[in-house]
Image: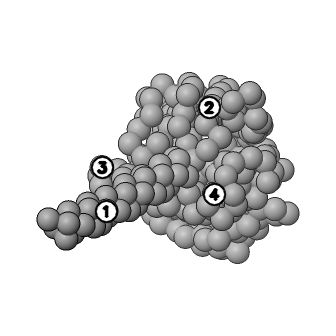
Amino acid sequence: MLFGPPSAVRRASFFIVCACALVSSACAGRGVFKPEFEYEEELYLALDGSATLNVNASVASLVALRGVALDPNPRARIDRAAVRALFEGPGVDVSKVSLSRREGRRFVHVSIQVMDVRRLALRAPFAWSSYRLDRQGDVIEFRQVVGRSAGKQVDAGWTGQEIVAFRMHLPSEIPFHNSPTGVQRGNILEWQQPLVERLNSTPLDVQVQLEPESILYTTLLLFGSTVVAAAIAFALLIWWVVRRGRHGEMAESQS
């Protein structure tokens, strides 16, 4: 545990914020996965450092960018167990692997659970990134620097318009970030890069500062305080009405 509210509330906050972000994205017509992205990492970060990471990528991009041992031929059979083995390791669990096809290319969709986001760098598909998560004064600082790609040549029929994206769903207020698109609905930040630049290993520097308490935790605290205040006010009102009634009865009996 790194920091944040009590573990039970923190977990509830994390999953509810994630669910709200997913619903928000779907309502905005975006969906969980943008079809135009050739490679996407979508990170749901909790304040204790644990995270869920969804990777949505064409097999061709995984081969070209990460040098994985998969066949980029769109007619090739994709072994889900082999895909799982690429991402899974100590402290990194794969909860789901699915496949799809678009524009004549095969895509994989992998959902990963990790207890410490910094452990992702120990897995080969994410070794191009360095991760930092530290408490600095009154904020939590997260930084991911995406560096050198495998740069393998793959004949995938790319047009040069393909995009790579790194997206974050965050559980608390964001005092600072360097996302060029700003904070999106659902407390989402996004960084995009042309696939050509990522193939050429143009660095991408993701920087975020977070408040140490989740939005849901703060909301629950405020809601609880409001309920308590309302209950006290209601109790005082009842006491006042009863007291006034007694005084009225006493006045009538004396008259």
Q: Nearer the observer, disc 3 or disc 2?
A: 2
Q: Give the quadrant of the C terminus.
A: bottom left
Q: Which mark is residue 10?
A: 4
Q: Nearer the viewer, residue 145 or 163?
A: 145
Q: Amino acid at mark 2?
A: Val
- Which percent across, then down, holds residue 243? 31, 62
Lower sequence index among marks 2 and 4:
4
> Is there a contact, CB below 8 Å, between mark 3 and mark 4?
no
Residues under labels 2 and 1: Cα distance?
56 Å
Label 4 Cα crowd, 10 Å radius (few <14 / some 14-19 / many 20+): many
Q: Residue at x 24, y 66 (%)?
A: 250
- Which percent across, then down, holds residue 191? 53, 34
Q: Amino acid at mark 1?
A: Arg
Q: Nearer the viewer, residue 80 or 18?
A: 18
Q: Residue furthest front?
A: 255
Residues under labels 3 and 1: Cα distance?
55 Å
Label 3 Cα crowd, 10 Å radius (few <14 / some 14-19 / many 20+): few
Colouring style: one colour
Lower sequence index among marks 3 and 4:
4
Q: Nearer the observer, disc 1 or disc 4?
A: 1
- Which percent across, then down, holds residue 47? 67, 48
Give the quarter of the image for residue 20: bottom left
Badge 1 marks a residue whose secondary structure is helix
- Which percent across, then down, holds residue 45? 62, 49
Residue named by callout 3: 28
Whether residue 100 sits left or right of residue 211 in the image: it is left
Above-or-below relation of 142 to 107: above
Residue named by callout 2: 208
Badge 4 marks a residue whose secondary structure is helix
Residue named by callout 1: 243
